[in-house]
Image (cartoon, helix red, strand yellow):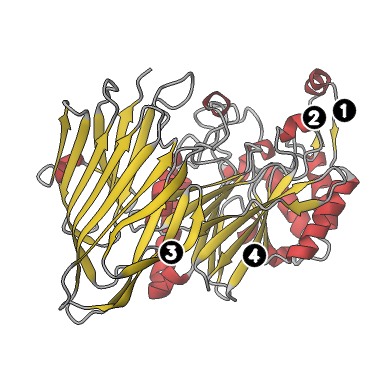
Amino acid sequence: MSTTKILHLSDIHYGNDFIPWALLKRRGWRKRPSPEIVAGLKAVIREVEPDYIVISGDFVNKARNSSFAETAAFLRTLLLNIDIQNRVILIPGNHDAPFLGKEPDARIRLRKYIQFTEDLFQDESTIDRQPRFIKRDDSNKLLLLALDTTLKTMSPRAEGEIGQGQLAWAETELKRIRRELRNDYERYRKIAIMHHHCISIPGGSAAGDRDMQLLDADGILSLLKTYSFDVILHGHRHIPHASHLVREDGAVLAVVGAGTTLAPYPDQQGKYGNSLNVIELDDALLEIRVTRWNASEDGSFTDRGSTKTFPIGRIPAKGYRINRLRRVAKISSNGDTHVTHHRDGVIVAKNERLKTLPLRIHCDTPGAAIKDFQIQRCDSCSVQWKIQEPQMFDGLFIFETDRTSRDVPASIIYEYTIEKGTVMRAVGNAPQFEEFSFTTATDVDDIEIEFEFPKGYTVQMEVRFEKNGSLMDANDYKDRYTLILDAVVNRWLFRFHAGKADCSITFSWKLPN
């Protein structure tokens, strides 16, 4: 199968609300989705014909046996014509666990949720019904890692945790699967599913995130990068979004959040209404497409033309090395960043032929956009784009004829602007630091990175190195790099003797007030 479709729902919140809360919000306390919304969701399922339906937590509003029993009956009706035993993936949310409980044993903490899954699936299978599991689909070349984030050892509010025990379990299982699959492991599309979000959500606020975050996100992100995951699906904040992170091998880890699909009240939907995500993993085009469907007033869900596309897989090294990579970023006082990128001396290895070079540009700052891409120099080649979206360009430089080791080393220079690429100042509860990460997927002799800030805009630059998803000691690289400030032009210059594409480099600076 060249394309796998996943219908991503979240945050149903079936059941009753707290009466004082309902009175405060001036609405009813019995939380039931409208018949029109339910009919609209059934129509989406028929139209999309998904291979999997993923529901990323918060099935009930309060973790009571009666609410879970009603929800199981409701979902069995909703998914009447679906092979739920094989095609429906569930993970718990913070509302599916006791609010104040800090019970570390998931079998006790989530005993009502586990009973709910048994009532819903009504079969003897136990592996895929636990709060955490890995589902391996060999026919679709798919790995689904389901994680439980309802642990609350640090805080009793709406935060979540993976926990060291679950992290160790996930690493052991993934290591075993990678060993069993051998070279086939990289051909599998790998999806992690959790309730809490592991990165800051575009459109959300730092203040709103304070009591909602995944407290130990760094550990699971490192693990997912190490084991080449392609997608993270989550819920929790009721804010639909699709963002991305970049791994050391140049691959993209797409992070997709779902809004609330069936919550009946506007105060729970925020400004986004009821929505769901349709995710398509296209092996033929090597891309992931994420489309949000929103509910209309009549309950019907429609595709609002909001598809975001991300590349699948790492950028492969194709028998060449680069003598020097140079990136010059000139930052304006309004936050726009003009970038000039040099690939000087593309040298083809002996007995190899080179037809294309990968080209991938991305920006992580919420609201930023890539503009005005231009080629300054491209020796006998042209550009073919696969993805051109505000925050990501992905394509290929294509040479007119195959290049070999006998050809003169090629050079490519291109430039573009990242509109609002930096926020330039610390404001309120927003993040106090900004970062830029640099990843190279092929061997490079030398790397030069320049950041030129406006005069009078004083920052202190720091650098860190990551390898295979783990933070490295900068002292391990001290003989290979320099980081110097030219105070006259307010420019930071980083030079790194690389040799191998063995790490990801992140630059960070504290924002002035």
Q: Quadrant of residue 409?
A: bottom left
Q: How many angstroms separate mark 3 from mark 4 (CA)?
A: 18 Å
Q: Which mark is residue 5?
A: 4
Q: What kind of element bears circle 3?
A: loop
Q: Are marks 1 and 4 in contact (CB under 8 Å)?
A: no
Residues at marks 2 and 1, CA–CA distance in whole angstroms: 8 Å
**Mark pair 1, 4: CA separation:** 36 Å
Q: Which mark is residue 313?
A: 3
x, y percent for residue 432? 40, 25
Residue annotated with mark 2: 17
Mark 3 touching mark 4, by CB under 8 A? no
Secondary element at tag 4: strand
First in residue order: circle 3 vs circle 4: 4
Asked whether 146 or 499 is in front, the reply is 499
- At label 2, the amino acid type is Asp
Q: Is residue 253 left or right of residue 452?
A: right
Residue 412: percent from left, percent from top:
26, 60
**Looking at the image, which residue is at 45% across and 40% down?**
217
Specify the farthest residue to the bottom. 351
Q: Which residue is mark 1?
A: 28
Q: Quarter of the image holding residue 122?
A: bottom right
Q: Nearer the viewer, residue 406 or 135?
A: 406
Residue at 49%, 21% in the rendered image: 429
